[in-house]
Structure formats: structure tokens, C-alpha cells
Amino acid sequence: METKRDIEKFIDEIKYGRMTRRKFARAMASVGLAVAIMPTGRTRALADDSVPTVFTWSGYDAPEMHGEFDKKYGKAPNFSIWGDEEEAESKMRSGFHPEMVMPCSYKVNKWNDLGFLRPIDTARLEHWPEIIPALDNVPDTVIGGKRMWVPAWWGLTSVTFRTDLAPEYVPADKHTWGILWDEKYKGRLSMIDSLIDGVMAAAIYSGAKDPFNMTDAEVAKLKELMIKQRPLLRFYTNDNTGWQQALASGELVAADSWNDTILNLSKQGIPSMFMIPKEGPMTWTCGIAMTAWVKPEMENMVYDLVNAYLSVDTGIYWVNTFGMGHSNKNVYSHLSADELTKRGLTPGDIDAYIKAGHFQATIKNEPVLQAMYEEVKAGI
């Protein structure tokens, strides 16, 4: 929480019951407070030992996400919900051993090094041939020739802006991350408060050859760029709802954001656009991994559960509900061009659309960048 506005919003969301575990954990972490882990939903203590346990984000436990599995076995898997991947990692280090986890691609390498994961045989996945080709080889997910993770959902990180307030950026050839450094809009811009979606976005704009493995000179250039940007920002935030409301009210002209933002603004009739910047958007991919703790008698069920998450029905529910992409290429023929455009997705070549972005990958020099980022925010 960076501002008085953030604190007031945090209190209001608790008051009116809109604060999710994920939001609460992030908010408390932002002021240096840890949260005791008390998983919601069906926990190990109450778990049905005859079905796998999935450790994942809130919302991924909806019945519509795993319908094929429920239909085959007549019951749902167990779920334990994490606040974020750091919380999940800490809990698994402490001895919590689910059968399935759902990290984003940039965590796969680290979790594999920690011994959490085991390879997945895609020949046992009925829906694997339906995966969008561009997602077949996401960086850092095939390790030593073994597939340690399969993609299930994806989206873009880019700029959402108010077309009525910044009309000069409407033409496609004017789309650029540079709007977030435009001094005309001082105090009406925002960045996502994270290394992966905020600092890496700035790194793309800086022209770094590989934003996820920058040289010392590139890091220094990035820091100067972020110092220049800091006084122009209304806030750094991880609150998706907050930046959407600020764009809707006109408090913000442009925001570093995810593609679901445009769906929610368009539903309100807010004149806005999601950019495909000339420097390239950032493509995030999250998916499914099987853990090293799967018992032999549970293995077939885990493969059936992975299959369920990769199905067309799950994908249609996911895109319609969350406004982000699913990895099954056959999902998109079930949605109209208008429905896809409203979600910041393309009615055209989905494979080319994904490839146009910079795939998120493991940040090689994360400690250096984290220290640099904290210095920028502190005004050092």
C-alpha cells in the first residue's frame, strides 16, 4: 500500500467483504506483515484421500474448471488455495505436499530445482494436440528435455488507456509503453507493483536485449528510466480493481495492466483501448504441474485432472468469466469476434498474437533488480 487512497480502499474492501485472500496477503505483505496460512475450501484435514489435492489460486477451484474430472469420478478434487506463489513455496518447503500445483511459467525452473515437480508425459493428455502451438515451448518449462509444466491460461500485460483523454495514442502506430512516461499526464499514470509485470514492462520500453537477463549497463539504464517515471505516477499497485476504477473515473489516463481490464471498462461503456505497443506487449502464461509427491495409485487421476483443465468447456468458461486466454486453440471458435475483442484478445491469428509478445521467463538477476526497484520507490 503506497498511498492514503490504497489504505482507504483496503479498509473499505474488508468492511464490505470484497477482500480476497490473495488481495489481503499482498496488502499485508506490502506493509511488511506476514499472514498466517489458513487455507480456505477443502483442506488436507478435511480432504478426501481418494482424490488428488490441487494447490492453486482462488477461482481455479470453480466446478466449471474441472467438469470432465468430476463427471468421470463423481466427485471433485480437493483444493487448497494460496495467496501467491511465494506463500505456496513457503508452505511446500514446510511439508505441505499436494499432488498438483498451478504456477506461472517463471516459477517452474525454481520449483523444479527445489524438487517440487516431476515430468509430465503429454502422450497421456487427450487435449494436448489441441494446445496453441505458440505455447508448446514456453521458456523455462521444458528442462533437460523433460516437460515439467503444461500451459493452461495466458494473457497480455500492456497499457490500457482512456481514448477520450489521450486521443493522440489511438492510432495503432502510436501505441507505445511511452505513454506511461508522457509528462502531459503527470499524476494520472500507474504501474503494476511487481518485478514481473512492472519492472519488466519498463525493461521492455528501455530496449533491453533480454529483459529477463539484463546486463549491469542495462539495469543502470532501466533505473534511470524508472526514476524519471516515478514523479509522473499516481501510484504503484497490484490491485486490478483499483486501477480499473481509477481508469473508469478518469483519475488515471493510462495504466500498466492486464487484458481483462478492457473487458470490464467496455462493460461500463468507458471509452478505452488495450494497446499492442510497438515495443511488444508482455505475454504471461500460467499452467499446471504435477508434483514429486504423487503416489502411484493417484497418477491416472492426476492426468485426468490435467486433461479436464485443458478441455474446451473449461476454456470457454475461463475466457467468458475471467476475460483472459486459454491454451486450447479450439476455444476461440466458440466466441464471436466482438466477444474476443472486448477481452483484449484477437479474433484473428491467435498463435501470431501470442508470439508478438515478450514471454515472461525466469528473472536471472532478481535480487539485483528487487534492490534497484525498492531504491526507486523509496526515492533513493
Image: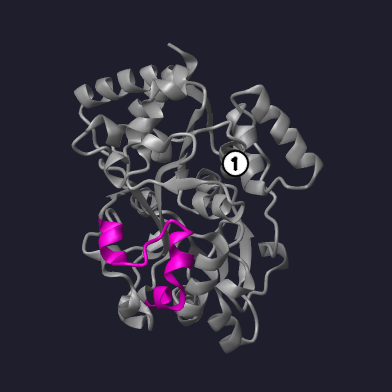
What residue is shown at x 46% (from left), y 73% (from top)?
335
Residue at the disc numbered 1: 248
Name the quadrant containing residue 139.
bottom left
Question: Is 334 part of what is drawn in magenta?
Answer: yes
What residue is shown at x 45% (from left), y 43% (from top)?
160
Tell me if 367 is positioned left or right of 342 in this view. Answer: left
What residue is shown at x 73% (from left), y 67% (from top)?
46
Q: Residue 328 appears at what percent x and percent y? A: 39, 73
Write the start and end of the magenta stretch as one range.
330-355
Q: Which residue of the protein is positioned furthest toward the right in this rendering?
A: 15
Which of these two is toward me, 161 or 358?
161
Q: Residue 95 appears at what percent x and percent y? A: 55, 53
The colour scheme used to paint the residues is one colour
What residue is shown at x 28% (from left), y 65% (from top)?
351
Residue 291 in view (yes/no): no
- Identify the image quadrant of the N terminus: top right
Residue 260 in view (yes/no): yes
Q: Please tell me whether residue 49 is drawn above or below residue 106 in the rendered image.
A: below
Given the image, on which type of amino acid does mark 1 rest? Ala
